[in-house]
Image (spheres, rainbow, N blue to C red):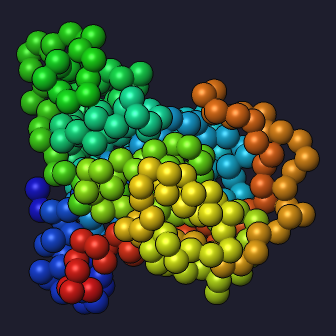
Amino acid sequence: MPFNRDKFKRTELMLGASAMDRLENSSVTVIGLGAVGSHAIEALARSGIGTIRIVDFDEISTSNFNRQLLAVENNIGRKKTDAAFDRLKQINPDIKVEIFNTLCHEETFDLVFSNVSCNRDSSNHLAHNRIQDNHIQCNHSRAPHITGNNIPGNHGNCKKPSPPCQSLQPSHPSHVVIDAIDSLNPKVSILFEMVKREIPVVSSMGAARRKDPGAIKTGDISETMGCPLARSVRKRLKRRGIESGIHCVYSTEIASRESVSQSLEENFLKSGRQRNPMGSLSMISGIFGYIAALEALKIILGDMI
């Protein structure tokens, strides 16, 4: 179903009808729905992107409230992917939202970057892919399980639906990926995979411990400076033979050393390590997210923007 263009009329005045057609037929994958990613998906949906694939394993907690768009009282304890789905559908009921409730790492890359999805319809009935623990499950009321050994990356442990779920359909390959996570090793693995698969990527570097919006820049990863996260990413990618070709959003502001908690975070990635929580401002992480979304649009539209 074509979008209701009345909602995006002012965007069309900026970009033109042809650009809006392209956006409606484009797909963006956003990995990480936290301080940066939650703002990125908001901007993408309000720009008229046709398909957004969202990837996150986490739940919303009170520690997210100072900087994450999805963190409101009614969402505490919910999966970030579910909260994001509802938010995006409230903006544009016709948008296709593909949910991947999983970690994004080597074992799930084929799954996350597959071209098969199952979406809710415009009346908001649940019919989206729920990806968890390397299984594909559809919660469509008439087809409780979907799968398939024929779905790339699936381990084939689910039962075939009977009758077949009519909402299962090919999705657009992702035209752009936005990397909005801050865990170093998974981030490096994702960026390496994007280069290997030749998928354009916009990567957000460190937004925490900063308060100067004027220091936020965009550029190739080889050009980043003043960002400890970017420096670590560069070093690890260089070991894998990659020194450039990854577009980044980063800050040249020297990160504040005083804005790091001395106590370890209570909730942390089970497969990772506990970290000291870092101070952050929603204004800065939000700008990172909006700039990342804009850079994704530039990649999709080329000389149309």
Q: Quadrant of residue 230?
A: bottom right
Note whether residue 249 is visible: yes
Q: Nearer the viewer, residue 18 or 210?
A: 210
Q: Residue at x 45, y 74 (%)?
A: 220
Seen in the image, is 142 located left or right of residue 277? left
Q: Nearer the viewer, residue 195 or 113?
A: 195
Q: Residue at x 36, y 23 (%)?
A: 134
Answer above or below: position of 11 versus 76: below
Q: Residue at x 32, y 21 (%)?
A: 135
Answer above or below: position of 34 versus 206: above
Seen in the image, is 24 located left or right of residue 61? left
Answer above or below: position of 186 versus 143: below
Q: Quadrant of the N terminus?
A: bottom left
Residue 264 screen position, x and y as percent: 83, 39
Seen in the image, is 174 located left or right of residue 186? left
Answer above or below: position of 159 versus 90: above
Q: Residue at x 78, y 55 (%)?
A: 278
Q: Quadrant of residue 257?
A: bottom right
Residue 136 screen position, x and y as percent: 29, 24
Note whether residue 69 is visible: no
Residue 293 screen position, x and y as percent: 41, 69
Q: Quadrant of residue 28?
A: bottom left
